[in-house]
Image (cartoon, rainbow, N blue to C red):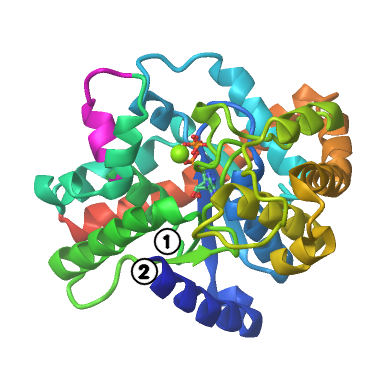
Amino acid sequence: GTSAAQARSAVLEELIRKDPGRFRVLTGDRPTGRLHLGHFFGTLHNRVRLQELGVELFVVIADYQVLTDRDVADNLLQHVEELVLDYLAIGVDPARSTIFTHGAVPALNQLMLPFLSLVSVSELNRNPTVKDEISHSRQSAVSGLMFTYPVHQAADILFCKANLVPVGQDQLPHLELTRTVARRFNDRYGAGSAVFPQPDALLSSAPLLLGTDGTKMSKSRNNAITLAATADETARLVKGAKTDSERHISYDPATRPEVSSLLLLAALCQGRSPEQVAADIGSAGAAALKKVVTESVNEYLAPIRARRAEYGQDRAHLRAVLSEGNERARAVADATLAEVRAAMNTCY
Ligand code: ATP
Ligand code: MG
């Protein structure tokens, strides 16, 4: 569960500080719209932090996975470019890190076939995140791709033999499945040696940031504040956020999820604790809280938004970043697929 993963994350942080060269990170996002503060504090911030510590970083733009919960992937090129923009704006450095799309790396996708053979239908059926996503899906029927996408994610992570995956809480069941796939592959085909590592999830201090309606901040729930939003849009969104009628502002996620998530957001932006932010506001009420949140978010995001606007001027650069990343990812995937085929005796 989450608390075990949090304890493990603290241990990992120590190991990373001592020897960042031991770690390789894979994470990613679906090109379905602009990234929001839930993505940022759940995983994006950690990606850049790890990159700066000297950890090698792979970022997948999961274009095929757009089709998990909808029939058609709309405006893919535009969404892909928006993601690359978000990445560059937050500080992902394409000279050190690899940004790529599923669609451009056939050998990665090829790994899904042997991996599917290593999991049972009932294991896939039990996945709580897939269940939750199906309940929020726009489709009336569950597609085979939706049902099996955690196996596809295992291919994402294992194609580059990543051993560290900075994610939000919803991804923990998928990481568990990836570990299972790696273990079973090694047992079945490894002939005594490990072809794949068993990757660890790295949780941030905000593994489940709530949106303005008090449920998980999500692109599809109209409750998100995007990185790219203007200061005015941010003010309007925060103003409309759900709170409660208690004038005294206190941090208590269990009983006051809406107020607490606003406090957490301000705290993350200020680099302080949510309790400290609450103490400053005292009994000034929800309006005062929202003013603090708006100012904190806007101040924190100002440099990111400025860089985003600047990079947005040069679409050709975004394409170049992607095509270089795709090339690097293809080389890595080809090497891994060759190794997998050798292990499985499918080289003829
Ligand atoms: P969304 O979840 O907003 O609908 P998505 O499904 O396209 O968008 P995901 O792939 O679910 O995006 O999320 C990408 C990463 O961001 C994952 O590591 C996920 O755990 C993390 N993440 C997403 N939303 C949140 C949140 N509200 N709080 C913390 N982490 C989050
Ligand atoms: Mg999601």
Q: Is 7 above or below relative to 149?
A: below
Q: Quadrant of residue 290?
A: top right
Residue in the foreground of this view, choosing between 169 and 325:
169
Find out whether the residues at labels 1 and 2 contact each other: C-beta distance under 8 Å. yes
Residue in the foreground of this view, choosing between 190 and 153:
153
Residue drawn 56% across the image and 26% down it: 222
Callout 1: helix, strand or loop?
loop
Query: Left or right of 322: which side holds 287?
Result: right
Quarter occupied by the N terminus: bottom left
Residue drawn 58% across the image and 54% down it: 42
Q: Which numbered disc covers residue 197? A: 2
Classify mark 2: residues with Cα within 10 Å, few (<14), some (14-19) or many (20+): some
Q: Amino acid at mark 2?
A: Pro
Magenta stretch? 139-150
Is 147 one of the magenta-colored residues? yes
- In the rendered image, residue 56, in percent from the top left (x then y), is placed at 61, 62
Q: Quadrant of residue 140?
A: top left
